[in-house]
Structures are given as structure tokens and as C-alpha cells.
Amino acid sequence: EYELPPPIDKIYDEEHKYLEPLRHFADVKDPLRPTDTAFFFHVPRAGGSTMKDIIGKCLKLVQSSEVGVRDGHDKDPMLEVLDVKESKYVNVDTTTVPGIQRAVDMGLAAAGVTDVIVSSYYHESAALFDLNHQGRAFMMMRNPIERAVSMYWHRVKEIGDLDAEITIEDYAQGNGIENNWMTRFMTNRMTGELTKDDMEQAKQILKEKFLIGLLDDLDETVYRIMKYNDWKFSTDETEKMKQEDCIQDLATVGSAINPDPYEIPTRGTQAYALITWQTQFDTKLFEYAKQLFDEQTKQWGTKERKKLLKKQKKKGN
């Protein structure tokens, strides 16, 4: 079998020094190695729960998220895989910073026990990987205005940490709204004003380090993520059909979706203006991500999508 040459540590010039802490995340253009571990950068309220269910329930892959530490397993001295509700999880919690440190100490990536690591802490998760055990990152994205509104209702109705007295306008004025969550978590710029440089860095990180998935293009996204990580359906025909149906069901119904219908503020309203202001960097990043999604079609897209893109190019769209 064809052997890949050993990985070489990436060296960055002054201008791209910000990529250095992320050097053990593979680049999108790097070949997949058997020692790589898929890393799902979970953007809240952007279809992440649906994706995790597809990975666990439908594809039967082993995940590291927060589920594996329930019932006292956060005290386990050794890594093990547990069965929880039709899915398999490693007994670590990669969704918190202390949990990531515990997983680092236990040698999670090198152990080869997990198919995918899920976290919203992209920079902190870099410590899980090393030159010979790299992370292969993908993410799901959603229109930032829709995401912000979904988060508002999720917190009012389900988490209950936002008082129902707080209107969406109050929320968007700074009472609970996240300011440019994606840009901040991607560049590790958690406080202070974001700058044009932060925006450029976020775009570069996105381009070099991520396979892009879009919530409103879910079937295509699942295909790409599977291809990118070389995840396959079962070789047993009946089992394969079950897996495909399972994905279709989840893609139709969704997991953790807001239980009650709600309206997205329309252009011209105060709520829309305020949310737009709070998500201006993320909106630019999302527009750029859609462009990258099209660029990634060539290598990772379905046959249908490749054909469609060629047609559009011919028309000069």
C-alpha cells in the first residue's frame, strides 16, 4: 500500500505566526493519514446537535464530547469507550477547558480510541494533537442573524437563563447576545474590539484549516464530511439503508431545534439592525465560508453538485 511521507512541522512567516498554535490541525489540502482524528468545531445553534447524532446514531462512530463523563466517568483513570443511548462515547469531556486538559493528560488523540472529537474550544483543543496525531477540522455554519435569534429563543424557552421579560431588542443591545462568536472563537480574540486584522485571520484559518458545512445544505454537507474523513457506510446493504434513512430522518427533523416557531426580525426593524451590528464580522465570515464551500466542491462535493457548479460557471454566474 502507498505510504505517505512522514508529516513535517509547518513553519510560518511573521505575517502568519497566528497559525503556529494551530499547526497540528491538518490543512484542508493535506492528505488524510490513518493517525488523524476528525475534529468537529461546534458552533452553537448551527446544526451541531444534528451532526453529532448523525455521527453517533447513524454512522456508529465513537465521539468525544461531554456525554462520556456522565455518571462519574470524569474520575476514570483510563480511557474507555462507553455505550450511551445508541451511540459510543469516550469517557472524556472535550467541551470544557478543564475537560480538554484531562483529555490531553490521558493522551486522547494518540490513543486512537475516538473517531471524532467535538468542541467549541478550537484553540484550546489544539493541545490534544501533535505532529504525528493531527486534528482534521470541519464545522457547520449558519446565517449569523438566524443563529443569534435561535440562541435567544433557546435561552428564553429551554435553558431559562434569560428572563422572558428581556426582549430580543434588549438582548441584541448587549443583554446576553454573543458578539461575533465565530470570529472570536476562531481567532481566540475573546475580549476587546475586533479589528480588520482579526477578520483576515479568521478567513485565513477558515480557508486553510476547515472543511465547511452549511446547515441549509445538510445532505451535501454530510456527504462532504464523510468523504473528508473517509467515513463509510456499512458494507451490509440492509445496514447501509438503515444508516441512510437515519441520516434522512435527522436531516428532516433536526436535533435540539427550537420547539416553538419564531420569527426572524426583518430588515428595517430595530432588532435586525442591532443583531446585524453584533454579528457584522461573523456575517462577513459566513459569506466567505459560502464561497469556500463552492471552492471545496471540486474535491469534496457530490457528483450532482459538481455538475451544477460547472453549469453555473458556463453561464458565467
Image (cartoon, rainbow, N blue to C red):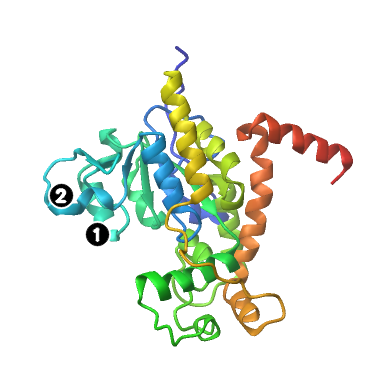
Q: Residue at x 59, y 48 (%)?
A: 207
Q: Residue at x 79, y 34 (%)?
A: 310
Task: Name the residue at the right extreme.
Answer: 315
Can I make out residue 134 in this image? no
Q: In this view, does 81 lie above or below 14?
A: above
Q: Which residue is at the front of the view, 14 or 137? A: 137
Q: Which residue is at the front of the view, 51 or 140? A: 51
| Amino acid tagged 1 | Pro
On the rendered structure, is 3 left or right of 294? left
Q: In this view, does 155 lie above or below 89?
A: below
Q: Give the mark, 1 or 2, whose residue is nearer the N terminus.
A: 2
Can I make out residue 265 in this image? yes
Percent x, y of residue 19: 49, 52
Residue that mark 1 sits on: 98
Q: How many circles with numbers are drawn on the protein?
A: 2
Task: Name the residue at the top extreme.
Answer: 1
Q: Residue at x 37, y 39 (%)?
A: 57
Of tags 1 and 2, the one toward the viewer is 2
| Amino acid tagged 2 | His
